[in-house]
Image (cartoon, rainbow, N blue to C red):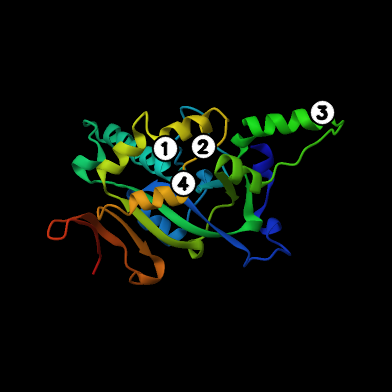
Amino acid sequence: MKVLESFKPEEMILNSEIKDTITLYHGTTTAYLNQILKHGLLPRKETDNDNYEKISSSASNTVYLTNKWHYVYAYKATDVYIQKKAKQEGREVFPWWMSWETIPCYIECEVPKALLVPDEDFFHSKYISQKIKSALKKGIDYIEMTWEESLAHYATVGVVGGIPAKYIKSFSILGELELQKELMYDKSAYQKDLKKWATGKGKGDLKLLDLILREDRSTMNGAWFMNQLPKNKEIKQIGKNPSSNTIAIVFER
């Protein structure tokens, strides 16, 4: 974390090919969506939002992206937001699907590879442990840990300095309760893979395409591309369109 917080994005991207990009995802909740679409994804030191402060905080200058765990991060962010707001207002906590006050969602980003760094938690993985043992046997006194390895074996990477709005391609809203039940069910394939990830034993076998295909099965999940949105208009309301049984967005006039 100290190493990550010493990095400067302007130096990382200097003399690099900014057009060499990769598409990755960030799980969040719709309560933050307007600000994200306007200002981009900001690091924790600029938002003071920390979904894991009770466990272990992340690097304060880094935003984390994934090609697999954006669903669980979206559900976590939504739950944390609801609990914090209920506590502030001194009221009972209700799950998102009862009030639709905020809804799980994720952001699709196309980010220059020059800004990517390994997730610091990747250091605790079995893959890195084996890499260290191999280096010691060969008499090598250092190892390199690349973002490519972090993504391939851990499914997460960091972006130093945050992600400007211009890197956002689309956002997806997860309004289907059955999808959450299925992905968060303790014996689901997603949870089995998540447990491997959480214990540093790899990212599991479920592929991004498997998750996208499952998501697309319901009209209560929807994606909106940035180039299709009305310019300079904030989202006023998100909810269910009863006539078509689809997730719908209303923009301000």
Compute the Cα span from label 1 to label 4. 29 Å
Q: Which residue is mark 3?
A: 136
Q: Nearer the viewer, residue 45 or 149?
A: 149
Q: Amino acid at mark 2?
A: Gly
Q: Earlier in the sequence, mark 2 or mark 4?
A: 4
Q: Which residue is mark 1?
A: 190
Is 3 placed above or below 235 here?
above
Instruction: Using the image, tell me which numbered label, if any, was put on residue 204.
Output: 2
- Residue that appears at 36% across and 57% down: 34
Between marks 2 and 4 in the image, the one whose residue lies nearer the viewer: 2
Name the quadrant of the N terminus.
Answer: top right
Q: Residue furthest right?
A: 139
- Residue that appears at 69% across and 29% down: 129
Rendering quarter of residue 99: top left
Q: Earlier in the sequence, mark 4 or mark 3?
A: 4
Q: Which residue is mark 4?
A: 47
Q: Nearer the viewer, residue 64 or 252?
A: 64
Compute the Cα span from label 2 to label 1. 8 Å
Q: Is residue 191 left or right of residue 67?
A: left
Q: Earlier in the sequence, mark 3 or mark 1?
A: 3
Report helix, strand or loop for mark 4. helix
Q: For mark 4, does the 10 Å Cα neighbourhood hold few (<14), some (14 to 19), or many (20 or more) residues? A: few
- Residue that appears at 46% across and 49% down: 208
Q: Amino acid at mark 3?
A: Leu
Compute the Cα span from label 3 to label 1. 35 Å
Q: Earlier in the sequence, mark 2 or mark 3?
A: 3
Instruction: Using the image, tell me which numbered label, if any, was put on residue 144.
Output: none
Q: Is residue 72 left or right of residue 157?
A: left
Q: Amino acid at mark 4?
A: Thr
